[in-house]
Image: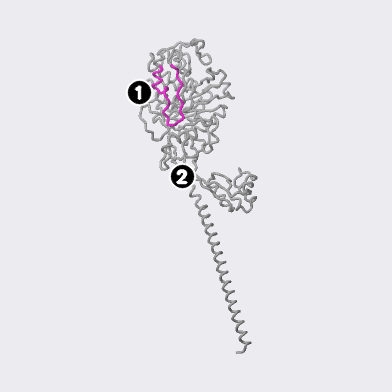
Amino acid sequence: MSPQHKDMRSVENVLSTQLKQIRLRLLVLIVAFMSVFMIIQIRLVDIMMLQSDRLGNAGQTYAMEGADRGKILDAHGNVIATTLITASLYGNPKMILDPMDAAKKLVATFPDLNIDVVYKKLTAEKGFVWLKRNLSPQDQQRVIELGLPGLDFQFEKKRIYPQGNLFSHVLGVTDIDGNGTAGVEKQFDHILKDPNKEVQLSLSLPIQHILHNELKQSVEKFKAKGGSGMVISLKTGQILGMVSAPDFDPNNPKTMGGENAFNRNTLGVYEQGSVMKLLNTAFFLKYGKGGVHAVFDASQPLALGKFRIRDYRGGERRPLTVEEIFFHSSNIGSALMALSIGPEKQMEFLREVGLCDKPSIELPEKGRPLLPSKPSRGSCMTIAFGHGLAASPIQFMQSITNVLTEHHLPLSLLQNPERTPSSIGELIAEKDRKSLCALMLKTLEDGTARKAKVQGYLIGGKTGTAEKVEKGRYLKDGRNLTSFFGVFPLDNPEYLVFVSLDEPQAIQGTYGFTAGGWNAAPLGGRIITRIAPMLGVEPRFE
C-alpha cells in the first residue's frame, strides 16, 4: 500500500474516533438535560398536587368541629358555641407576579381591606405577610377561585359563637389558649376541655331571640342605660331565656369593653322597688292576722328618723286592706304590714325564700345581696316596699319562684341539672298562693301593671320603680330602675317573665312618667304575646 493511502486511512480513523467522542458527549448532554427536565417536571407536578390537595381539603378542614373543646348547645340541640379550624390568608411577596393586580382582586373580594395597605404588604421585602385572618369557608373558596400565585392559607383553631351577641353574657368567652374565662365557658371549663363532651343549656334559641329583640328595642325607645330580662319555667325551675343589655360579640373580644360584659341578671345587685311587695304580702299572709282583708291606716306618712315614708303621688290617704295595699302599691301600708309582725321574723322569712345568700345559678358572675347589718324597725319598714335590701334579679326571681311553687327547686341554666328541692318545706299555704295570684291578676287588669295585659291570656304581675342610690342617698331626679314580672297562665302558673330597664326616659306617650308601669310593663306584655304560643300556651277568649 502506498504511503498516500496509509495517510488517508490514518485521517479517517482519527475522524471516526473524534465523531464517536462527539456523539458520546452529545448523548451524555441529552441524557443530562432530559434528567434535569424530568426532575423539574416531577417537582412541579408534586407541588401542584400538594397545593391542590391542601386547597381541595380546606372545606373539609372547616368542618372539623370540636377540635380541642366541647360544644355548648341550647335546649333544642342547636350549637351555640363550638371550635372550628379556620383558614387565615397570607401572601409571599416574592412569589406575587403582579402586586397591584393582586391587591385589586383581593380588595374586590374583601371590601373591608384597604388597597394601599394590601399593595404595601404585597411589595414588602418579606416572604410572609398576613392579609386576612379567620376566613369563612365561602371566603376561602373565593380566594382559591382568584387563582393568584403567592397566596396561601394557614389553619388555626378558633372558638366560634354562631349566634354572636345573642347568648353573650351566659356563654362568656375563652382566652387565646382555649381556657374559659367567663360565663358557662368558665363554669364548665373542666368538662368542655374534653372535645368529646358537651354542655346543653336550658336556654331556647327562639325565646332568647325574642327576649333579646324586645329588650333591645325598649332600651333604645326609652333611651335607657341598659336592661335585663329572663323567662323561667315555674314547673322545672329552668331558665328558658336570659338577656342583659348592653352586650358584646364573643367572636370579637374587643366589644367587651365598658359595661358590655356586665351581666345585670346575675352580677348586678339592685333594690327592686315595689316588686318586693309580692314577697312582703306573702310574708304577711303567712305570719299576719286577717289575711287579705286585714286593714292598715295609710292616711298619714310614717316617720323614720328625719325622713318620711310616703306613697307615690299621695296615695289613697285612707285605711286600706291588704288587697288594696298591693293593688295601689302603697309604701305606707306595706311598711305597716311588716311592722305588725316584726323585723326578726321578716329576716327569717327572707332567708327562707332565698334572698340572703349568694345565688346558686351555674355562672361564675354572681353578686351577693346587700342586707342590713341587723334587723331593725327602720329596715323592716323600708324592706317591705323594696328599699334597704339589694339583690340580683336572678335572686329575686328565685324568691318569687319559691313563693309561688311547692317544690322550691334552685333555678338552673342546664337542660338536665343535678339538683334537689329545698328542704324548707312549703313556704306559704296553697290558699295564700291563690290569694297572691288573685292580687297579681287585679294589679294587671286594673292597676300599675295594666299595660302588660295581653288579650286572650290570663296574666298576673307586679311593677317596680326603685330610686337609684348615689353616694348613700336616693336620687329624686327621675333616674330609676324600673321592672316588671309576670306569671302566666295564672290559673295554673307555668312561666315567669322578668324585665328591667335602667334609667328609662320619659317619651311621647308616657306623659312625663318614668315609672315601671309605663315602660317595663308593656315590654313584658310584648314578650309574653310572642312566647306564649311558642310555649304551647293557647289563648282563651271566654
Q: Which residue is mark 1?
A: 424
What segment carries the magenta color? 346-373
**Which residue sits at x=39%, y=31%?**
236
**Which residue sits at x=55%, y=44%?**
133
Quadrant housing residue 471: top right
- Tell me the mark number nearer the camera, choosing from 2 and 1: 2
Q: Secondary structure at mark 1?
A: loop
Q: Secondary structure at mark 2?
A: loop
Magenta stretch prevailing secondary structure: loop
Position of 542 compared to 150: left or right? left
Q: Which residue is mark 2?
A: 65
Give the image's coloring scheme: one colour
The picture places residue 273, in percent across and down from the top left corner, at: 49, 20
- Of residues 210 and 166, the one nearer the viewer is 166
Q: Earlier in the sequence, mark 2 or mark 1?
A: 2
- Of residues 293 and 253, the one nearer the viewer is 253
Instruction: Give the quarter of the figure containing the C terminus.
Output: top left
Looking at this view, name the residue that lies furthest to the front: 3
